[in-house]
């Protein structure tokens, strides 16, 4: 179950599944930051453009990271963000990577859509992904010493990036917790046949082809209409279950970013002119 929390003007959602284990995290809304216009206001992208063709100022983005990460009692210099490419690469964060992707004067973790952090790394305690309709997924071991943050658009989803992230954990599968955050819902995500066929192919490879149709909704009941709407959250949940993570260890927000575009940035609802919101998780160090 997801709960909305606030700190001043900043609002974010947390999963009770992670919170019950003392794991600091947040799926942040678009509110409480310093950016303006199409990027109003807690935008964390320096690459996306507004209707005038301009990008947000790096200083604004940095200040927004400061604001959001302070809710998790950390800083951009102790966090890492990915330069997302809609692929399936999950990189292990190393000591010295702090600030990459969260402090605009430093390089991003290039060529990846997932990050993994364990207790051996020093100088870093949080991971971030940015989305505006794609699926943000935060994972943690129950003791909080291993965490991962994943950005899964439809391409990353059918490349099974979420399983690749789960494979990084050095703990029993029943000790992995997963929170699937706000993203475009099946109510709004009309897709082409290539998405359906890609999911069908992946599910067939995993021996779960019989589940394919349950991941989609027909746009209409007319037999002549083949258009479908995809449920990205449920596809990723099914992949996690197929990997061996118990269903009770997976929490899905059920919040559609298109339907709630006043609360979240939405690429589809804005016509492509929007910022991105951040989802972050902080590693816990316990004696």
Image (cartoon, rainbow, N blue to C red):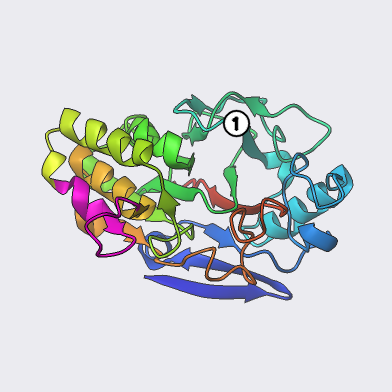
Place residue 105 in its image quadrant: top right
**Nearer to us in this view, 287 or 129:** 129
218 falls in the magenta region = yes
Give left or right: position of 238 versus 46: left
Of residues 104 and 257, the one nearer the viewer is 257
Q: Indicate left or right for 160 with 243 as reference.
A: right
- The quadrant in which residue 194 appears is top left
Quarter that holds the N terminus: bottom left
Residues packed near mark 1 inside 10 Å, few (<14), some (14 to 19) or many (20 plus): some
x 72%, y 35%: residue: 99
Q: Magenta stretch: residue 186 in it? A: no
Name the residue rendered at 20%, 50% in the picture: 213
Q: Position of residue 234 (x, y in %)?
A: 30, 54
Residue numbers of the magenta segment = 211-227
Residue 146 visible from this viewpoint = no
Residue that appears at 67% across and 25% down:
96
- Relative side of 266 to 169, left or right: right
Q: What x and y, as percent, mark residue 44? A: 72, 49
- Residue sitting at x 42%, y 54%: 190
Q: Which residue is mark 1?
A: 122
């Amino acid at each position: 179950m997801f709960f909305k929390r606030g700190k001043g003007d900043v609002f974010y959602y947390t999963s009770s599944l992670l919170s019950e284990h003392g794991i600091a995290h947040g799926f942040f809304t678009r509110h409480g930051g310093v950016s303006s216009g199409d990027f109003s206001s807690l935008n964390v992208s320096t690459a996306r453009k507004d209707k005038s063709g301009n990008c947000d100022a790096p200083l604004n983005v940095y200040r927004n990271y400061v604001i959001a990460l302070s809710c998790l009692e950390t800083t951009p210099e102790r966090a890492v963000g990915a330069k997302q490419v809609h692929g399936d690469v999950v990189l292990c964060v190393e000591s010295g990577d702090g600030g990459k992707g969260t402090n605009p004067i430093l390089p991003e973790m290039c060529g990846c859509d997932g990050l993994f952090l364990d207790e051996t790394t020093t100088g870093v305690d949080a991971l971030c992904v940015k989305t505006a309709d794609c699926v943000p997924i935060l994972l943690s071991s129950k003791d909080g010493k291993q965490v991962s943050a994943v950005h899964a658009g439809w391409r990353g989803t059918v490349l099974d990036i979420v399983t690749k992230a789960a494979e990084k954990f050095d703990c029993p599968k029943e000790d992995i917790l997963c929170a699937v955050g706000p993203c475009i819902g099946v109510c709004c995500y009309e897709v082409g046949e290539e998405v359906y066929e890609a999911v069908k192919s992946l599910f067939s490879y995993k021996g779960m082809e019989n589940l394919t149709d349950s991941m989609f909704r027909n746009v209409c009941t007319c037999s002549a209409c083949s258009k479908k709407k995809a449920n990205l959250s449920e596809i990723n949940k099914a992949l996690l279950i197929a990997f061996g993570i118990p269903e009770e260890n997976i929490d899905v927000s059920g919040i559609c970013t298109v339907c709630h575009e006043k609360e979240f940035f939405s690429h589809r609802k804005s016509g492509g002119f929007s910022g991105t919101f951040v989802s972050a998780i902080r590693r816990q160090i316990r004696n």
